[in-house]
Amino acid sequence: MLQQFPIPVYVGLSSPWENAGSMRNNGWDLTINWRDKVGDFNYNITANLSDVKNKIINLYGKEYIGEQITREGDPMSSWYGYISDGYFQTQEDIDNSPVFGEKKNIKPGYIKYKDISGPEGEPDGKIDSFDRTIIGNPSPRYEYSLNLGVDWKGLDLNVFFQGVAKKDLYYSGYGIRPFYVGRSMFENQLDFWTEDNRNAKFPILLIDGSGNNPNNMISDFWVKSGSFLRLKNVVLGYTIPKNITSKYSLNTVRFYVSGQNLLTFTNAYEGYDPENSVSGGSFYPLMRTYTFGLTVNF
């Protein structure tokens, strides 16, 4: 039996800064509920999907620029940085390519950046602030969830999935950069560039005491998809029949086991939770949680 099929569509204007400008949000939400019964078998399905986009309408000509940019015509707080082009593999490659800063400070294994613009709007043979561009959106475009529930002769099972699509995360700090500002090194950072490992996940291994190495500049090398699908919660239970519990003056006796954050499908860097911000330099791995319980009602 179909219970609900609402498709609200919304368009709104809001002001992220008082007296500073306006932003438009528009999108839609879809929710579907289904409940049915086949003999002693009951089941229900609830699915949600939302789509939202935002755009700065008016900032009175102003721009706010750092690792993120907020300007008219673009999404709010878009990631703003350089376009990577693999690694410098040889000294000859360095000598024949535009670099950030002085070439004597660049080594094979450093991240290579594209020269996309200059003061006149054309490539000018060097890498500087004119080569920055929008490289991602931290706001999720789509959010969705799926809840499945069944029960049969005292057994019950509930499974909950959730996910996000079209969201970009900026990975920074010691969680992905070995020896960053006096920090240590994690096992997942061992895949770094060497002459024998030229297609490594990470650039050449360096002791970067200040964090100012060109490899650390915000670029699409560090801005990755934050999309994910997660098995958020599973609960399996069994309720003892009432004709048994009533003999002991008990109303309900239910045993159950539950698990949270059991599986996550994502392209995010190992060790990071794609659901949370990872731009602060520290991070915590997502913990799986298992619970065994007993519920008794008198």
Image (tube, rainbow, N blue to C red):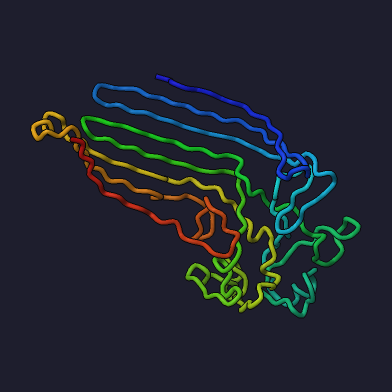
Side (left or right) of 224 relative to 243: right
Q: Residue furthest right?
A: 120
Camera-nearest residue between 239 and 127: 239
In which quadrant will I find the C terminus? top left
Q: In which quarter of the image is residue 41?
A: top left
Q: Which residue lies furthest to the top in this view?
A: 1
Above or below: residue 238 compared with residue 197: above
Q: Which residue is drawn at 68% across and 75% down?
A: 108
Image x and y of residue 84, in percent? 70, 61
Image x and y of residue 265, in percent? 47, 49
Q: How many labels does the image show?
A: 0
In which quadrant will I find the N terminus? top left
Residue 69 visible in rendering: yes
Q: Quadrant of residue 253?
A: top left
Q: Quadrant of residue 154?
A: top left
Side (left or right) of 103 relative to 286: right
Image x and y of residue 15, in percent? 72, 40
Q: Residue at x 60, y 59 (%)?
A: 279
Above or below: residue 107 compared with residue 38: below
Side (left or right) of 230 relative to 110: left
Camera-nearest residue between 190 and 253: 253
Residue 200 visible in rendering: no
Above or below: residue 107 compared with residue 65: below
Camera-nearest residue between 289 and 1: 289
Image x and y of residue 6, in percent? 53, 23
Camera-nearest residue between 76 and 197: 76
Q: Which residue is drawn at 71% across and 67% down?
A: 112
Above or below: residue 67 compared with residue 97: above
Q: Which residue is drawn at 63% across and 46% down?
A: 139
